[in-house]
Image (spheres, rainbow, N blue to C red):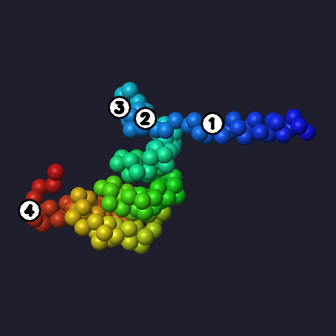
């Protein structure tokens, strides 16, 4: 019995020591992680997406007040969207909107959430429109405002329909389509 108690105490101490000695991630660690997203030929290495996204999230958890926290949270969201991990992407964008509402990355994250997650992955056009319109109301003059307006205009359209509309519009204006 005494040996069992000693063993449990030892396990608790080892676990506590491991948790406390966990290395705090730095900006340099994030840049190194980011570099692993690319192969030597410059193409994306999707096999590293989960590991890098988790590292980004861990950085934000360890450094929520760091000036780059919203950037890494946004990048974690992007990777989860590319991995089609929609639920996690939604949660990450919620975190971005709630904890970093003044960040330049927040409207960008919302744009991805509306256009790629809700429109493309969930096929929920009403929710996509709601999020895109919220960007226009909450972030007037944002650098992505024109892209948001175009996404609202073309919400639910196929790429072919969009190209036809653009071609027709340019033809009507007497412009050549490039």
Badge 3 crowding class, 10 Å Cα cut-off, few under 14, some 14 to 19, many 20 or more, is few
Residue at the location (39% across, 34% down)?
28
Mark 3 sits on what residue? 42
Reading the image, the residue beneath label 4 is: 174
Q: Quadrant of residue 38?
A: top left
What residue is drawn where x is 11% and y is 55%? Answer: 176
Which label sits on residue 18? Answer: 1
Which residue is identified by label 2? 29
- Tell me which corner region of the image, top left, top right, bottom left or bottom right, holds residue 172: bottom left
Mark whose residue sits in front, 3 or 4: 3
Element assignment for label 2: helix
Disc with the residue nearer the chain's start (1 vs 2): 1
Residue situated furthest right in the rendering: 1
Circle 3/circle 2 CB separation < 8 Å: no
Residue furthest to the left: 174
Q: Residues within 10 Å of mark 4 (few under 14, many from 20)?
A: few
Front in this rendered view, residue 147 or 50: 50
Q: Residue at x 87, y 34 (%)?
A: 3
Q: Is residue 170 visible?
A: yes
Mark 1–mark 3 Cα distance, whole angstroms, equals: 36 Å
**Is disc 1 in contact with disc 2, using a CB cutoff of under 8 Å?**
no
- Structural distance between the alpha carbons of marks 1 and 2: 20 Å
Q: Secondary structure at mark 3?
A: loop
- Figure check: 26 above or below 74: above
């Amino acid at each position: 019995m005494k040996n069992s108690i000693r063993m449990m105490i030892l396990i608790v101490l080892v676990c506590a020591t491991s948790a406390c000695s966990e290395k705090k991630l730095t900006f340099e660690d994030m840049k190194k992680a980011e570099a692993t997203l690319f192969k030597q030929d410059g193409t994306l290495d999707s096999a590293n997406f989960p590991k890098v996204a988790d590292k980004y999230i861990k950085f934000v958890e360890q450094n929520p007040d760091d000036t780059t926290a919203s950037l890494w949270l946004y990048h974690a969201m992007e990777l989860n969207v590319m991995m089609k991990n929609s639920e996690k992407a939604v949660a990450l964008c919620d975190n971005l909107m709630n904890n970093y509402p003044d960040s330049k990355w927040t409207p960008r994250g919302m744009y991805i959430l509306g256009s790629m997650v809700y429109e493309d992955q969930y096929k929920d056009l009403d929710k996509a429109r709601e999020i895109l319109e919220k960007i226009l109301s909450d972030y007037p003059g944002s650098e992505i405002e024109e892209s948001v307006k175009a996404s609202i205009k073309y919400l639910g359209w196929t790429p072919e329909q969009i190209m036809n509309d653009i071609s027709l519009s340019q033809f009507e204006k007497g412009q050549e389509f490039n």
